[in-house]
Amino acid sequence: MIQLRGVSFSYSHADAAVLKRVNLNFAPGEFSLIAGATGSGKTTLLKAINRLVPSFSPGTFLGEVVINQIDVTNQNPQKIAELVGYVPQSPDESFVAQNVIDELAFGMEQLGIAPNEMQQRIESIASRVGITHLLCREIATLSGGEKQRLAIAASLVAGQRVLLLDEPTSSLDSTVASEVLALLKELSALHGITILIAEHRLERVLKLVDSMVTVHADGSVIKGPVQAPTTTFVPVSKNTLKQETPSVEIEHLSIEFDGETVFRDLNLKLSRGSITALMGPNGSGKSSCLWAIQGSGVRSAGSVLVNGIDPASLKAKDRLALVAKVPQRATDLLFLNAVSAELYESDAASGAAAGSTAKILESLIGRIDPSLHPRDLSAGQKLALVLASQLVKDAPVLLLDEPTQGLDYVAKDHLANQLKRLAAAGKTILLASHDEEFVSLVCDQVISLGQNAN
Amino acid sequence: MNQKRMGNELHPVTWWTLALIAIATAVISRSVAPLLIIGIASLVSVMLLEKNWARSIRLYATLAAVVLLTRLAFRVLFNFASANQDIALQLPLLEIDLGLGNPVHLLGSLSYAAIDAAIVDGLRLAVIILAIGVASTLAKPSQLLKYTPAAVYEIATAVTIAINLAPQLSTSIQRVKQAAALRGRSHGLGAMRSLTIPVLEDALENSMHLAASMATRGFGRTGETSLAKSLWLRTFSLTSVALTIIATYLILTLGLFNGACIAALTLSLVFSVLVLRISDSQKIRTALNRKKLGMQDVLLLTIGVAFFYAVSRGWIA
């Protein structure tokens, strides 16, 4: 169904090849996993198949791509839209329309499919993917899982036989993620659709797929039997610093937006040196809860005390010495054009001695070339840089919002070890996450939000 | 959740044409009455046809009110009353000498005529804003896409998506602002940079993602056009543009009701229609649920045109 022959690709801004002489073959109906570290080229491999690489990312492309016996090497993505469906990393950024029907029709309208046939195809794909009941909804009102289903339906509705997905479950909680994966399995097994899926969280996918492709950092790509990767997690001994005096006390915390309750009456005590996870489905208020504790978010009722002080009563600047926070998109904090500039800015903004942030960064992840542009760092390095710039303020409490998003196994192991060391040094850590594996590895206690919705 | 609205019964093109007629009428009207009629009609239609009218029209209504009040305030502040007018309000005249020749006059006596002119001026802008607001509430700009001719489809899509992304930009500014406060510098050039760079990065990245995803679904396909056809297309569109420019020049110099003007305008229209026809015949795109103009659409449009004519003749004043 899909053949890659001698495919090599290097981006025009880098010397090293992302893909080097790749030869791959996928049979019709094959369900295959693309694995590899962050930045290794999983996305590039997928995009090479539907020709977004090189038409949207300039670079040097060599080799041949054949889909369904058609040589598509010299085509652009528009021309092969009826052959390949593509679900990019976050479906939210890829929706074109405001409501479900129009979104499903968009691709077919581009391909010139007759209106009465469109209606039929929409109905048939909707029932296959399980979104028939959503057809007259607005996209903004859908949940994360429903959006993912819609994105899958929209990329298969014109009769595509190949489906490429880039980390389709990375922002879904585990129940919804396994439902989406089961759907993909069904599409490949029952309907013969060839599916390639790039994923970080292998344990969910491994038992479903027929084959596994590993993209290595040197650009080589090898297809082989399905096997679990070896993790290198080093257990840190349980810390002894844990004291019974709570450093964060939350009482009767409630949050509502526009008169709608997000959650109500949260009571929580976090002791010094503990790591706590805040879990719950999308929209259950994890992020709002962290902002409320940090002091700049809204609280409709309740109190938060950090070492006896309410952060909301302090000025924004003074809060930073009490509570450190890494927001969901850590890169929002990076805005300078070199790591060294970021480090300098961080020292200056927090009044720390020159080099303090660099020292913390090194203890977290080792040395990073200070002349690099922050954008060129890996996801794990970016997170470490932001974490260091927050830790330099020496706040006793650290809040992290979805810290594992976009991290591969190795980077996650790093982060787990970093957090354990910080806790052992006496920091109180609260993280919002829907990554059960990570939470079970790192956290001492788990708080679930979202049961009291409605 | 059934989101059918009564507004959907009418063709989206009707709503936008009505809005254009309302704007044209507002521009030519010289008194309060027609403007009030348009304003009230807009508000009533959105109240009747949209369930969440208060929320959707709030932004436009506020903007309209601000424009009206600003216009009035400016009139009071920078007032040039002539001697022989009825004076409504006697305010102290301030004379400020900036050392730039004549002193600047502020406030002073305010005549009825001046207030009247300011109200008409302000209302005109307010009504234009309201008309656009009502049209975009009742018929989302994206609904118009289905009816755009093939020749301008790509541009129209880009515009609609840009309009849709505007609210996204404001949420991303909010998010980055909140995050930037965590770095501890809240003022100065650094603060400006810490806000703009992530937001711009965000906006660029989002639009690239969207463009890529649209391409993978076939957006931007071109049919197989013969060389002769595309040559004709190019010639016709250039001719049409040239004629439009000539017509504009003639209107500005000779006035609208002149033989040469009308001829140039008609010719340029003919060529534009030709261009649209030829590019439509490539037939590479289809549309789901494309509506046809109904009786009620024709009726409403006729009323709109009649109203415009009445105002232009000065029958409603």
Image (cartoon, rainbow, N blue to C red):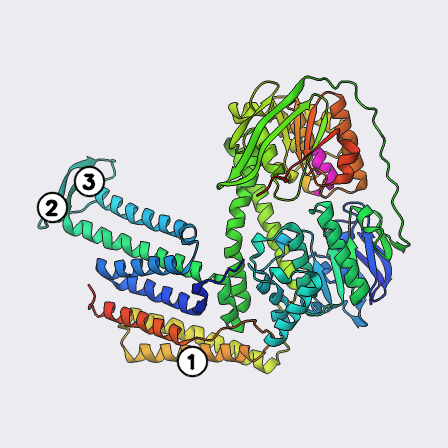
Q: Is residue B216 visible?
A: no
Q: Which residue is mark 2?
A: B87
Q: Quick one: quadrant of the N terminus of chain B?
A: bottom right
Q: Which residue is mark 3?
A: B107
Nearest to the eye among marks 1 and 2: give it: 2
Q: Residue flagged by tag 3: what amino acid is it?
A: Leu
Q: Residue at point 71% right, 41% down?
A: A434
Above or below, A394 against B245 in this view is: above
Q: Is residue A313 visible?
A: yes
Which numbered circle lies on residue B270? Answer: 1
Magenta span covers which residues?
A376-385
Task: Between residue B100 and residue A114, name the one nearer to us.
Answer: A114
Q: Quick one: quadrant of the C terminus of chain B?
A: bottom left
Q: Chain of mark 2?
A: B
Sequence-wise, the earlier of marks 1 and 2 is 2
Which numbered circle lies on residue B86? Answer: none
Whole-number angstrom distance, CA of label 2 to CA of label 3: 13 Å
Whole-number angstrom distance, CA of label 1 to CA of label 2: 54 Å
Kindly give the residue lying farthest to the right in the view shown: A225
**At numbered mark 2, what does the secondary structure look like: helix, strand or loop?**
strand
Sequence-wise, the earlier of marks 2 and 3 is 2
Q: Residue flagged by tag 2: what amino acid is it?
A: Ile
